[in-house]
Image (cartoon, rainbow, N blue to C red):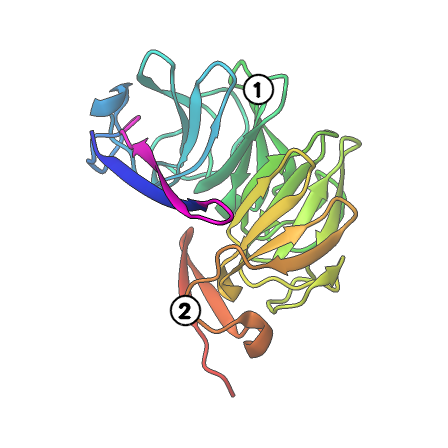
Amino acid sequence: MPTSVWRCVFFVGVLWAQTLEVTYKVEVSTVAGSGRVGYRGGPALEAALNRPNGITVAKDGTVYFSDDDNHCVRKVTPDGQVLLVAGQPRRAGFQDGDQEEAAFASPHGLTLDPAGNLYVCDYLNHAIRRISPQGEVTTFAGGNGGGFEDGPRRQAQFLYPIAIVRDSKGNLWVLESGNHALRKITPQGQVITVAGNGLPGYKDGKGRGTQFNSPVGLAIDKNDNLYVVDAGNRCIRKDHPHGRSNHIRLAQLPGLDDPRRTGGRSELLHHGGRTRGRRSRGP
């Protein structure tokens, strides 16, 4: 089993110094997948996957993941079996129904609610789908073609939803690469744009005055602060519960321009459900 060792050195003392070395061992193991591209279930380490993407873990230890190029949602059970949750393996489509009738097109981000419902960013269908604990799939929001429209969730429009989380108040937060925006689906069923205006760029602030550039990842902390991987701007952004977005210096890559100096001039290109980065030239 591969092991990574991290060593941290601390200096302790006032009139004298003593070095205290603490070693952390991080063990990495494979949970599922044989390394072969394809579709196969069964024992987790013998399973075949095809570009697994979004992931979330239930309280009982079940690992749910979206199998992007197999166009389905799968799970790894606590006893080590890979099973189909919903979708038609290797066949893209857009259809509600039971576990085997339902169809997805390049599913991405996933999140669970306390009742065990699984919410899926159906990337190429521009929709948020819901899978019940019984395996019934319904279109929860969007699905009306790509666009940028707020309102009642079934009438709203999304463009390449890529990541989703749920907060302590029951709101679902959806990150969109295509609209460069952060949207919220309230418990009352309304879709609201919280940050971003549909155009790529770099700007901190509130609401539609904020700009992202092809964001791809989303996480939430215990205080409902949201953290956005702003891939095109090569930085991590933070959205506070009161609605302000700002740049935080957590993970800007060394050797790359700060987006605050370049104006966020970069872009990500969508290719059949894949997201690929490209740096734009300045004027």
Q: Residue at x 31, y 16 (%)?
A: 81
Q: Amino acid at mark 1?
A: Ser
The boundaries of the magenta stretch are 12-32
Q: Residue furthest bottom?
A: 283
Name the residue: 59% across, 73% down. 260
First in sequence: mark 1 or mark 2?
1
> In the picture provided, is 84 more to the left or to the right than 38?
right
Q: Is residue 239 above or below residue 60?
A: below
Q: Does any portion of residue 87 appear in the rendered image?
A: no
Q: Secondary structure at mark 1?
A: loop
Image spot of residue 87 (x, y percent): 43, 28
Q: Residue 53: name its quadrant.
A: top left
Residue density around tag 1, few if under 14, some if 14–19, many if 20 or more, within 10 Å: some
Residue where numbered disc 2 is placed: 278
- Which labelled disc corresponds to residue 196? none
Q: Give whichever of 278, 8 is nearer the camera.
A: 8
Q: Is residue 106 left or right of residue 192?
A: left
Element on which disc 2 rests: strand
Residue 272 sits in quarter? bottom left
Residue at left offset 48%, top offset 74%: 257
Which quarter of the figure has residue 54? Answer: top left
Which residue is the site of mark 1? 132
Image coordinates for residue 66, horizontal then vertical, percent? 42, 34
Work out whether residue 178 or residue 242 is closer to the camera in this orientation and state it.
Answer: 242
Residue type for callout 2: Arg
